Amino acid sequence: MARNAGAESLRRVVVSEEEIRARVAALGAEITAYYPEGEDLLVLGLLKGSFIFMADLVRAIRRPLHLDFLVASSYGMESSSSGQVELRYDPDTSFRDRHVLVVEDIVDSGTTLRSLVPGLLERGPRSVEVCALLHKRLAAPEPEVRWVGFDCPDEFVVGYGLDHAENFRHLPFIGSL
Ligand code: IMP
Ligand code: MG
C-alpha cells in the first residue's frame, strides 16, 4: 500500500486487485457470449471514472468491437450527487443498427444512467445495455443494468478509475475513504 501515493488515507480495501481481475475476465466472457456474431458492437465508456475498467474490460471481450467515450458529469468536486447530468463530450460515432454497451464505473443514485440511456435509445441503436463495475443498490427507480461487477457498500469508494475530487483514480484496487 505504501507505494501507492495517497492510499494511506484510505479506511479499507473494498475490492482487491485480484478480485477485480477475476471478475473482469468473467464479465468479458459473459459479454462475448451475449452478443450475436456478425452484429456490430460499440462499447461506450463514461469518462472519467470508467477509464481503467473500460481498458481492462474491452481486452476481455473476445469479439470484434468499436469503442468510444462519453463525458457525463453529475458530481463536480463534491461527494454527494447534484442530480444534474451534464454531457461534456458526445462522440459523433453513429449508433444506427449497432449494439451499444455503456460502461459505467458505479451506479449510486442512478441519476446518470436514468437521464443518459433514453437519449442514447433515440439514436437508433440495435440495443443499449449497461455494464457497471460497482452498484450501490440504492437507486430508485433502478436503472436497467445488465452486468454488474460488484455490489458496493454504501460508502464513498475510490480507486481503479473512481475519484474523490480527482484524487485516487490511479489506485489498482478499490478502497473506501
Ligand atoms: P449516480 O448518477 O448517482 O448513479 O452516480 C454516478 C456517478 O457518481 C458515478 O459515475 C461516479 O462518477 C460518481 N460516484 C457515485 N458514487 C461514488 C463513489 O462512491 N465514489 C466515487 N464516485 C462516485
Ligand atoms: Mg466521478
Image: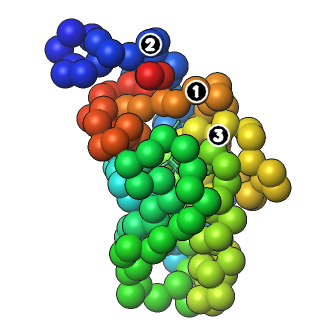
Residue closer to the observer: 41 or 53: 53
In the drawing, what numbered circle is on residue 11?
2
Count up the numbered dots: 3
For disc 1, does the CB lie below 8 Å from ligand 1?
yes
Q: Is residue 33 above or below residue 98?
A: above
In the drawing, what numbered circle is on residue 135?
3
Give the percent coordinates (x, y) of residue 149. Answer: 59, 37
> Which quadrant of the figure contains the N terminus?
top left
Q: Residues within 10 Å of mark 3 (few under 14, many from 20)?
A: many
| Horizontal side of residue 150 vs 87, given as left or right | right
Comes first in the chain, label 1 or label 2: 2
Task: Identify the amino acid type marked 3.
Answer: His
Residue closer to the observer: 43 or 104: 104
Residue 56 visible somewhere in the drawing:
no
Residue at position x 32%, y 28% from top? 172
For disc 2, does the CB lie below 8 Å from ligand 1?
no
Give the percent coordinates (x, y) of residue 86. Answer: 48, 71
Task: Identify the amino acid type marked 1.
Answer: Glu
Q: Is residue 118 above or below residue 112?
A: below
Residue underneath mark 1:
155
Q: Residues within 10 Å of mark 2 (few under 14, many from 20)?
A: few
Task: Identify the amino acid type marked 2.
Answer: Arg
Under circle 1, the secondary element is loop
- Dots 1 and 2: beta carbons under 8 Å? yes
